[in-house]
Image (spheres, rainbow, N blue to C red):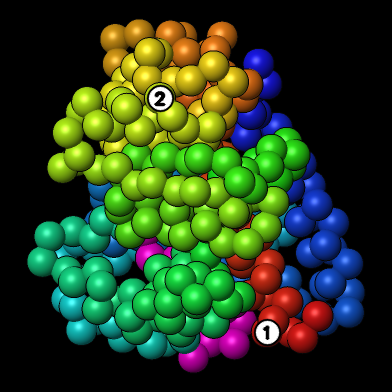
Amino acid sequence: MILLDGKATAAAIRAEIKDRVQALEKTHGRTPGLAVILVGEDPASQVYVRMKEKGCAETGIRSLPHRPEASISQDALMDLIRELNADDSVDGILLQLPLPKGLDSQACLNLIDPGKDVDGFHPINVGKLALGLPGYRSCTPAGIIELLKRFDIKTSGKKAVVLGRSNIVGKPMALMLIEYGDQGNASTTIVHSRTPLEDQKAFCQEADIVIAAVGQPLHVKGDWIKEGAVVVDVGIHRSDDGLVGDCDFAAMKDKCSAITPVPGGVGPMTIAQLLLNTMQAYEDHVGA
Ligand code: GUN
């Protein structure tokens, strides 16, 4: 069994980015800039944002923190986004989700300049993904594709099941798995909360690749997984036994040909992909 070590892979990506930032700064006279908007004080979001800013610091990307209070008005938040859109020193804009109650996140995402939308949430970028055109792609599924690529896991012609249909993970993941390419070309099924459990199990039992993004601890059982399957676990949950994923790792690890650990699998790759997307935005902006 191959452990798909996202922590080590993300560290390697950060080292590559750091070298590239240093080289490009010499020619272009500035480093990449990522504006990071965190509204309010949601503790989980604070942890994620801290990790994203740490990734920036380590690679030489300038993170530009914006921390409006939860009481900010929709208009004032939209004005901040307009300001960042117009600021030439800002290459990427990240609006951490979820927003506090009362704020319309889709209206904010729609306002972000698609050329600075390093989270890949703007409808233009989602549309480009659907059409197979180049554009910014949601960091978790794009990070998973990058992880599979770096471990030389090919999905072409294989059966894939994605559990979950969120706009951030499940839907874009399925679109990426049906794109052309070695880490695409998969016959892909999405199952979700309205798929009867016995059907979820049956689809998974047929699958060569299982990507779990349901947000339920230990949802995917050991006997759901076929011998030799590749399992990618997007979930992370606190439990009495420490951190667990959406999949019962212990019950399936010996059957899998490859599996991501929790923690240290998908999480670090999401952040690495955000840094890659920010580099892409910077290179487009400076003409590198
Ligand atoms: N909330 C949960 N996941 C994400 C993500 O990938 N990006 C942002 N901005 N917010 C999130």
Q: Residue furthest bottom?
A: 86
Q: Is residue 132 above or below residue 216?
A: below
Q: What is the C-alpha distance between the residues marked 1 and 2? A: 46 Å
Q: Position of residue 20 (x, y in %)?
A: 83, 62
Could you classify mark 1 by the number of other residues whose Cα lies within 10 Å: few (under 14), some (14-19), or many (20 or more)? some
Q: Give the extent of the magenta segment.
A: 86-96
Residue located beneath label 1 in the image: 285
* Residue at figure coordinates x 84%, y 72% from the top left: 24
Q: Is residue 154 above or below residue 108?
A: above
Q: Amino acid at mark 2?
A: Gln
The residue nearer to you, when weighing 203 against 100, is 203
Q: Amino acid at mark 1?
A: His
* Residue at figure coordinates x 79%, y 47% from the top left: 15
Residue located beneath label 2 in the image: 205
Q: Is residue 135 magenta?
A: no
The answer to whether residue 246 of the structure is visible from this angle is no
Q: Is residue 93 magenta?
A: yes
